[in-house]
Image (tube, grey):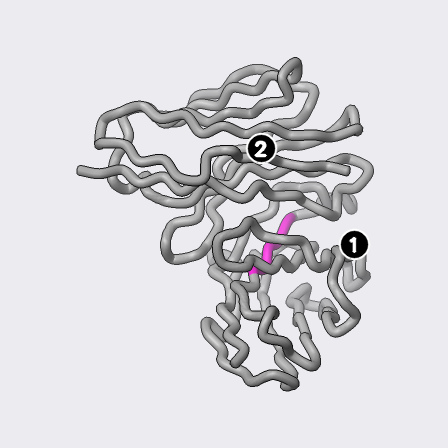
Amino acid sequence: DAGVTQSPTHLIKTRGQHVTLRCSPISGHKSVSWYQQVLGQGPQFIFQYYEKEERGRGNFPDRFSARQFPNYSSELNVNALLLGDSALYLCASSLAVGGAVLDTQYFGPGTRLTVL
Amino acid sequence: AQKVTQAQTEISVVEKEDVTLDCVYETRDTTYYLFWYKQPPSGELVFLIRRNSFDEQNEISGRYSWNFQKSTSSFNFTITASQVVDSAVYFCALSEAYNNNDMRFGAGTRLTVKP
């Protein structure tokens, strides 16, 4: 079975631009979470979606937004990019059976975003 | 608020040595979940284990073993007879039952296994 997939793999943007990152969960998984991992640090939680609804949000500015589609795939959008947004963006999916969004999360390979 | 501390930033061992990665956590919740993930150079986080707060039994999986002690709020990970392929960054993480949308990671421990 395919794991979590993310696109693109790498991305280079300039300050002030907008970016959209995409994630497809493992088949059957209904919950998707997004994390930002700055070099040398652990991942930081950005958003969690379950059944197309936002279930959690981390401490990130409103420039960050996300959505989940009927097929459970998800997009992360970042507006007005800053140099500090340069990071590896990880998507994770979980079964979330019965809405138990605390199920084990399985991660994709990430999108490495560089902001110049 | 939940917090995970991995005090060891980097560890270097020679192949076949045993190595223990430390993880200390803080939480006010009585129901919580602990995880270990491995991040090889490719970047993808690989799930290794999940423990809930009610299950303090230690676990062994091949060369990997985990020691969960609520009394000291620790969840340590030991690799026996390390191999070069074990070289990676290892993350400990915590999720609280009442704040389960926010999985909190430690800063990670970079393990290098030399041949």
Element at label 2: strand
- Residue B32 visible: yes
Query: Residue B45: image x %, image y %?
Result: 48, 50
Query: Residue A8: image x %, image y %?
Result: 50, 75
Farthest left residue in view: B115
Chain assignment, label 1: A
Instruction: Return the residue nearer the eye: B10 or B21.
Output: B10
Q: Is residue B47 above or below residue A60?
A: above
Amino acid carrying mark 2 in the image: Arg
Chain assignment, label 2: B
Q: Residues within 10 Å of mark 2 (few under 14, many from 20)?
A: some
Query: Residue B91: image x %, image y %?
Result: 51, 41
Q: CA distance from mark 2 to mark 1?
A: 21 Å
Which residue carries the number 1 mark? Answer: A56
B46 sits to left or right of A78: left
Query: Residue A82: image x %, image y %?
Result: 63, 76
Which residue carries the number 2 mark? Answer: B50
The image quarter in which residue B42 lies: bottom left
The image quarter in which residue A83 lies: bottom right
How many numbered markers are drawn? 2
Pointers 2 and 1 within a single chain = no
A104 sits to left or right of A79: left
Instruction: Return the residue nearer the eye: A7 or B111.
Output: B111
